[in-house]
Every structure is written in C-alpha cells, then in structure tokens.
Image (tube, rainbow, N blue to C red):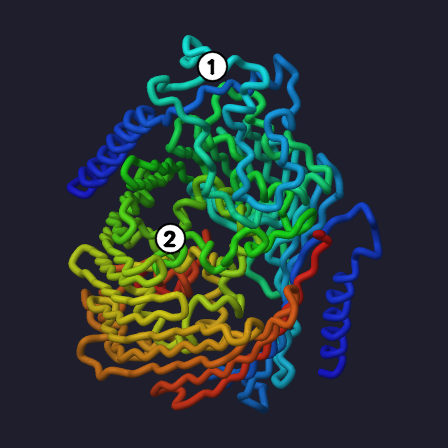
Amino acid sequence: MHQRNYSLLILSLSILALCRINELSAELIYSGRAQSLLYSYEDLYSSPAAQEENNFRFYQYLRLNLKQRSEKSTISFHTYLRVTDDLNIDYTDDPNWRLYNGYLKWDKHSSSLTVGRQWIHLGPGSLTLDGINLSVGSAGKSQLTGYLGLESPYSRRFNVQGWEKARSGGLHFTTKAIRRLSLGVGFYQKNRRGEVAFREAGLNAKAALPGGWQLNSRLDLNLLEDKIQKGMVRLRYKGHERVHFFGEYKHYQPQLFYQSYFRRFKPKANDQFRGGMTYFITPGVSLNASYAAVFFDDENSGYLSISAACPHGWLTYYRGDGFGGDEDGFAVGASVPVKEKFELFANIDYSSYSFYEEEDRDYLFSSIFGFNWRPRRDVTAGVEFQDVNNDVFSKDFRLLLKFAYNFSSAF
Amino acid sequence: MKKTALNLLSVSIAATALFCAVLLGSAMLEKPEVKFPHAYHVEDMGMECEICHAEVAQSRSGLDDHLPGKDGCAECHDVEDTDLCTQCHSNPDEPRSFARIMSYSPKFNHAVHVEKEVSCAHCHGAVAKSDSSATEHLPGMEACMGCHDGMQAQKDCILCHENSRGKIPADHVSSLWRRQHGDDASLDNGQSCTLCHARNDCQECHQGDNLLPRAHPPGFQFKHAIEIRTGRTECSACHEQSSFCIECHTERNVYPLSHQRASWAGTLPGNGGRHAVQARINIELCSACHSDEPDSDPVCAACHEN
C-alpha cells in the first residue's frame, strides 16, 4: 500500500511539473488544468477483503493542450486523463486510471487530421475511438468527416481492443450552404468479433426559422434490420423575450447488437412526447414547466418538472409515475458569491419513491454544502460537505476536498 | 404498420417544415442604409483602412465610433451633388449615415491589438472583399476565439464580457439544456460548441465515471432504476458501455432489488413473473448487465433454450 501511494505521489508531482512547461520550449504554447480531489465516503459494497468500509479516494485529473507557436500553426496535442487510488481500502484494480482522450491534430485551413484516442459525436456515431479522424471542409460552409479505428473500451487500465473485436468507422457530411439551415447525413458501423454489430445511417437538420422558431430533427436508420433506430423532431420557440417553449416527439428502438441473444424476444420500440415552457419574469429570473411521457405497448410513464430559477439559485418540484416507478421530490440549489473571491453553495434533494405500486415508499435525502475560493484567476480550491440519508444507508456523511490549477502560455 | 405510418408522417412533417424555412429565410436579407463597396475601395483603389477609420489605433473601447461620416467621404467624393445621392444612399429622400454599432462589447480594445501587431485583415479580412457595408461583416466571437484559445491569448469570458455569468447563452441556463444540447452537437461534432468549450469539456460529463461535474445528486445510485426503466433518459449518452453497469452489478455482486423479489422469475410455464413484464417493456435494460455481445450466452438461455 505504501508503494502504491508513492507511485501516485510521483505521478501527481509529474503532472504538476508539466505546469512549468514554458521552460522547455519557447516555440510551444499550451493550456491546461490539473485538478486534485480527495473524497471520503462509505461504500455499501466494498471488496470482501476490505477491513474498512470508509473510502478515502484520491483523484488526479489532467487536461493538457499543446500547440506549435506559429501564425499558421497546424500541429497540436490534446489529452484528458485521470488517475485514482483509495488510500484506505485495498481494491484490486487500484491505482487505476483512465485515458479519456489523447490525440495529435493537424489543422490546415478548414481541414484536420486527428490521430489517437478521441471522442466522436457525429450524426448516428457516438463513441470514444482509438483511431483516425479526417475532416475536410470548405470555408465553414460544408464539412466531410470520416473516421476509422477501434472502439475504446471502458477500462481501468490502458486497454485497446483488437481490430477483429471492435473496429468501428463512419462518415458524416454537414453543410450550411443554405442560410439558417444546417444539414447532416452520416453513416456508422461497429463490428464485434469479426461481424457487423451495428450499421446505421442518419439524417439530421437544424433550421432557424423566422420569428425565433428553431426546428431540430434527426432520423437514424438501422440498416441491418431496415428499421428506424431513432427518430426525433423538436420545435423550439425563443422569439419572445419573456416566453420560450418547445415540443418534441421521439421514437426509440432498443439498441442491441445485431447478433444479440435478446433479439429472439423481438424487442419493441417506444414513443416519447415532451413539452415545456419557460417564462422569464426578468432576464435572469424564470419559471419553467415541462412534461415527458413515454409510451410502450401496454405501459406508459410520465414525468413532470416545475422549477423556478434566478441568478443565484433554483427550486424544482418533480413527479414521476408509471411503469418505471413512482417518485415525488423537490430539489433546491443556491450559489452566492461572497467578497469577490469566495462562493458559497448548497444543494438539497429530497424524494419519496417506490419501484412498484404495491410497495411502501423509500425516501432519499441528500444535501451538499460547501464553498469555493479563487484567490487568483488560475487557482480554485474548495470544500464540500455531503450528507446522504435513505432507508438503505441510514446515514452517510461525505467530505470532498478539491483543488484546481489552470495553466497557460496566453499573454 | 401503424407505427411505421406514424414515423413516416413525422419525417414528412419535418421535411416540409424545413423546406418552408428555406423559402422564408431567403426572403429576409437585410438592406444597409449606405451602399458602400469595400472591395472597390480596398482592392481596386488600394486604399488603406486608416484613411477612413483614422482613430482605430488609439481606440480602447468597443463603443467608439470608427465609421466615417459625411466629412470623411467628402475627402474624395462630391457629397453636395444631389444627382449622386443614389450612388451611396439606399433611400436618397432620407439619406442616413452608417448606423452606429452599439452592440459590441465596451471592453474591446483596438489599441492593444494594434500594439500586438494584429493586422486589420486578420479580424476584418472578409470585409475587404465585400460589396456591402452591413454589420454582418464584423468579426463575431468565433473569429475572436481563433486567437483567444487560451494558448495564444486569454480565453476568459470576463476579458470581453462585463459579466461572465451573464454571457452564458440563455438556452444553457434551462435545466432542459442538458438533454437537448446533444442534438445540436451531433450535427457538427460539437464544433459550434468550441467557441467556449474544448472537446475535453464534453468528456467531463460524457465519460460517466467522472467525480465532477456532478450529473446526478448524491445517492442517485439508490433510485436510478426508476430513471432507466422508463427509458426517458439515454444512459448511454454518458455511460457509453454496459461495462460501466457491470462494475457494480456483477463485479461487486450488487443485484438490482427487483431481482431479489420472489415474483421476479415465474416458475410456471407461460408465467415469466415480473422479469417477463420488464423485458417486454424494455429489454435493452437487461443487456446492461447480461451481455448481448455476439457469441455470448446470457443467463436467459438457461430457461429459454429449453
């Protein structure tokens, strides 16, 4: 355990040392953020070998961007990673770390080539990819993007899946050639163990209509099954300074691998309707109400949310019912700046819920109180006290200490 | 069949609405008061920017008026000849000067940019080729962020905006933004978000094992089943893979409470108990823990194969 802690300490110091990177090269410009967190909490389901139930977990996050200093700078490196270890309980996967992204990027005019681990969210394709992404554009009007690689696994170690197991790729074309209209068409495929597991084509569009209306639509087609995987239409109105509202319809088919065992049960799709309105009493003070309904074959559920918000706080009442379970609750949050460099904040959430109609209700009460201190523009420190009460826990008091340092070469 | 018809109807409505939007949008171009062809003056006549915009190099406020008036144009043009009014004015019966720009940030400092040897063309390049004097040629925030990327120049909102909190787009403040912003981002891989956000910002939420920012209240682990059973939230937007769920539900032997109830698995033929009801509603939920990978054989096979 002592050896692991020293490794973590050395790694953390190395990360902080990167903050002095301006001594390395005058040709390199950089920005980033190092965030350290210490979180104490009680875990319900600790390792069987653990002698304690109280966790004392340390997290170190690093965001780093490096770019070659040049009028026509074309090469940059970006990464976001995390390492964590529990200082009190011996978990077998500790210390563990996650590389969320780490990639080199070449930019030239409106085109770019990205190589490495990167997050893609484009049309029907949404995944973390270990691979390459090539994007070719024309003066901001149109963009053609293609990507190919391996789907990155969710892993506590630096793992890469094999070509046979998880190769994925896609294409997407976006155009803004018509004023006030963005159109996109895309294709996405994921393989698993040498076979095609997902293959989708998608259309999406966003139109800014006169009078403050906005129309979003999306249609993803499952090409293996000739079905609509996801269809969505949303109309938003923001043309009045006091009243905004929206309406949305969504059709959703369960997303399963093509070879999935579960397909023999002929999964059914659901339809969802949502609507909501925001009324601005003043530009910073608003009332909001929204309702969502989900319809399956013989079942449905609903969710109502009513809230009020102002620059320093908000209050929400919510109620859900239907096949998913019943819940009623309210949440309150506030954030108050004090003496320019301090900020006090608090959140309280109470709900009464049951998973099935015939069962008694459980309750869940959680609260957070804390403050942030920002002595300089690039340094933030803070403390949070958290409390969780419910029938399972009875009571769990948690403490979160946080420190963040932003560094950059910017003048 | 009924659902297919409903889906096709929805798509048709969306397509029709888009078509109407294109027709209406194209009819709404604004016409400037003064017809001023920058391209002729800059590219054909070779005029320097400072000839008409004389005091820019000393300007330290975005509210300073750098647009030339009648006296400025009189240096080269006969402004008293009424036969020539239509050459420049859209409405010669009520000739007006350039509309003063009042919407730019008062904190914008031209002088600092000139001192840093940022050329006029670097920010205003498009206007040199323009035949119009419309304000659409003013550099927007996106142009500014080309240099104010946090590496070449500072990126803080407060640098240009008087109240950084107030410059959060109005639609971000709504609690619905969290569920709606993905549709905009999926059009262009989040490029429209990069004015303020880096790609790493997305992953602080969209890699669902981050401690901060907090997407769910403390204790959400106790009642998240309600959220996911209804299907109104796409958990996969942040928790990309089922291995996230497996970490608790399999590796740490945390069985969902529903599975521990006597009615969960029926014992009589044709009576699947509560699990059959649940699976018929939303079988994708089962695949979160019971693998649906190709060639895998989830626990269902023990009963359903026989």
**Mark 2 lies on residue:** B171
Residue A183 drawn at (x, y percent)? 40, 33
Residue B46 drawn at (x, y percent)? 65, 16
Position of residue B264 in the picture relative to residue B98 (left or right): left
**Mark 1 lies on residue:** B80
- Of the residues under marks 1 and 2, which one precedes in the sequence? 1
In the rendered view, would you say A134 is above or below B290?
A: above
Quarter location, residue A198: top left
- SS for callout 1: loop
Residue B162 numbered mark, or none: none
Residue at the image position 55 percent from the left and 19 percent from the top: B74
Residue at the image position 27 percent from the left and 60 percent from the top: A281
Position of residue A103 in the picture relative to residue A52 (left or right): right
Quarter location, residue A316: bottom left
- Between B29 and B275, which is closer to the camera in this rendering? B29
Residue at the image position 54 percent from the left and 75 percent from the top: A339
Tell me, yes or no, whether the two marked residues, 1 and 2, touch with CB atoms within 8 Å.
Answer: no
In the rendered view, would you say B113 is above or below A352?
A: above
